[in-house]
Image (cartoon, rainbow, N blue to C red):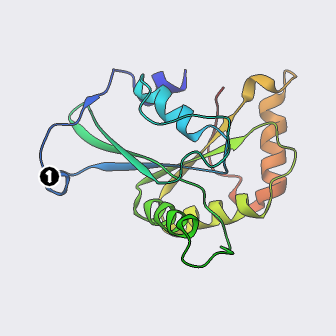
Amino acid sequence: YVVARLFPTKPTAAPAGPIEEREEIAIAFAGLPNVGKSSLLNSLLGREEVIVSEKPHTTRESRDVFLEFEGTPIRLIDTAVIRKQQKLRGSLVQQSAARSLSAIRQADWVVLVVDATKENWGEQDHYILDTIIKSGASVIIAANKWDLLEGEDRYEQFKKRFAREFGLFDWIPVIAIS
């Protein structure tokens, strides 16, 4: 359903040539480890392009995937882990997080993938959303693991939890995915 809404026709590989010569739309996928960023990206592409694992921190480097949709070049960015404070200065984790934050700041759109089953969001969720808002990118929340929620009013319940937690950002559109 989400794939059909985002890509009503099948995307194709981007044409060859320097990317800086083309106007592209950059879409970053951000969120905590193991919320489904890489799985969502693979689903949108219709192929296994990025590694998916149940093991946290599998995506250690942000990965760009280029495609073309109705003549428009698109760069999808699978971001690595983002942490507010890095304990290991100069570490690979810190460098990876810096590249992910840079990808968010350069994106036109950011899909913030969250675990819909979480009752409360933590400091890292707030930090990532704050970074997205400050970047000026358009944002959409992809509430993953939707199929694990129960009840007819699960969308309203999720939106209430989100509004309670993020208050001023309750205007952000939410799509349910599984």
- In this view, the residue farthest toward the bottom is 89
Q: Position of residue 89 (x, y in %)?
A: 60, 79
Q: Position of residue 156 (x, y in %)?
A: 80, 35
Q: Residues within 10 Å of mark 1 (few under 14, many from 20)?
A: few
> Where's residue 103, x and y in %?
44, 60
For the residue pair 172 and 11, the one nearer the viewer reads as 11
Quarter holding residue 102: bottom left
Quadrant into which the N terminus falls = top right
Instruction: Please report the residue visible at 78 percent of the width from the left and 60 percent of the height from the top.
Output: 167
Q: Residue at x 85, y 37 (%)?
A: 157
User: From what the image shows, is residue 153 above or below residue 28?
Assistant: above
Residue 155 percent coordinates (x, y): 77, 32
Image side of residue 147 versus residue 72, left or right: right
Instruction: Please determine whether, in this image, residue 88 is positioned above or below residue 110.
Output: below
- What amino acid type is highlighted by mark number 1? Pro
Which quarter of the figure has residue 55? top right
**Secondary structure at numbered mark 1:** loop
Rendered residue at 63%/61% (across/down): 128
- Return the residue at label 1: 18
Work out which quarter of the rendered image holds the C terminus and state it: top right
Q: Measured along the vertical axis of the image, is residue 132 above or below residue 39? A: below
